[in-house]
Amino acid sequence: MSKNIFLFSGQGSQSVGMGIELSQRYPSTQAIFECANDILGFDMKHTLSQATAEELAQTNISQPAILTVSLIALEAMKQEQIPYQGVAGHSLGEYAAMIAAGIVSMEDGYRLIKHRAAAMQESALAHPGAMCAVMGADSEQIKAVCEQVDGYVVPVNYNSPAQTVIAGETQAVDAAIEQFGTLGKKCIKLAVSAAFHSKLMQPAADKFQSEIQDIAFGAPQVEFYSNVTGKLLTDTSNMPAYLASHLTSPVQFVEELHQTAAAGYENYIELGPNKVLTGLVKKTLKDVCAVNVENDKTLQKALEKLR
């Protein structure tokens, strides 16, 4: 039997109306909305269907909204009896992955996201920064450029061999972009006002860690691949410290994909809005099946390939 791994989308993949179509197909997803509403204090189904793109882009809305859509897609896979032996998420997606792996309950997953989003939003206002995707340069070249410019800028998301995201102080990021331009490398500035996964998130990490000490964490019931190490996470004895370091550490997604391929995973199923991770899988691994599930059309296409 083929090995399946579920991948979970990160921040920035949101869109107006996401998740509604799948939720209507599977009535059991109503429990996800009820859980979200209870813990977050706002109507998640109304937010997904009625919020503007600007509202959805706010960190304290986009993080729980993307988590919700990922959990709806996860429920669809469970209802369709698609098994999975492993999980991985990209940044925010690691929280849906923790729920899917049984490390935390859905309720505690929403509590974690509520605290995380609030801490990150507060830190972003106090310590603004910028992020930019750099195309066509290898990680060593990107690191070298970041070290040459004045100010603080570092590689933070190793997304694929052809794409790495840098983050840091806005002026330093702009200077790096200018340098990459002279080298003929394409840069796309991200629509964020903070430097996620860099040391500028340290105040958020400290606050977040102190707020989640009472959350119950368990051992993963399936293989769980970590953004921080790029490898299997086996020690969940101090998850508050791990999740705090996750906020300030680079996302080692390329390494995760290589590790999963070495472990024999053949089917990569992205659950959540958009298909960013599906594209990264296709750019990084050869001879694997990569599909995404976010609505009826993508669901049917995925089921055709997985059955």
Image (tube, grey):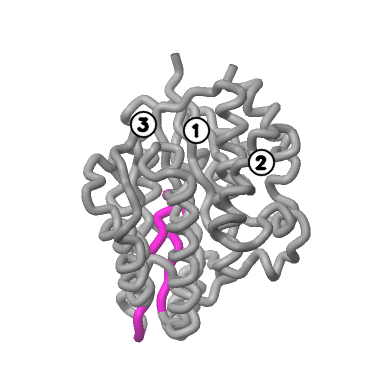
> Quick one: label 2, few (<14), some, or many (20+) residues within 10 Å?
some
The residue to which callout 3 is attached is: 222
Three-letter amino acid code at the position of disc 2: Gln
Three-letter amino acid code at the position of disc 3: Val
Q: CA distance from mark 2 to mark 1?
A: 26 Å
Foreground: 202 or 278? 202
Write down the quadrant of residue 57 in the picture.
Answer: bottom right
Residue 296 counted in the magenta span: no
**Residue 266 located left or right of residue 15:** left
- The structure residue drawn at horizontal position 64% and vertical position 38%, both measured from the top left corner, is 29
Q: Position of residue 140 (x, y in %)?
A: 31, 61
**Residue 52 located left or right of residue 61:** right
N-term mark: 2 or 3: 2
Q: Position of residue 274 (x, y in %)?
A: 63, 48
- The structure residue drawn at horizontal position 48% and vertical position 75%, both measured from the top left corner, is 194
Residue 154 counted in the magenta span: yes
For label 2, the SS is helix
Looking at the image, residue 88 lies above or below residue 300: below
The residue to which callout 2 is attached is: 30
The residue to which callout 1 is attached is: 268
**Magenta range:** 150-168
N-term mark: 3 or 1: 3
For label 1, the SS is strand
Q: Position of residue 171 (x, y in %)?
A: 46, 85
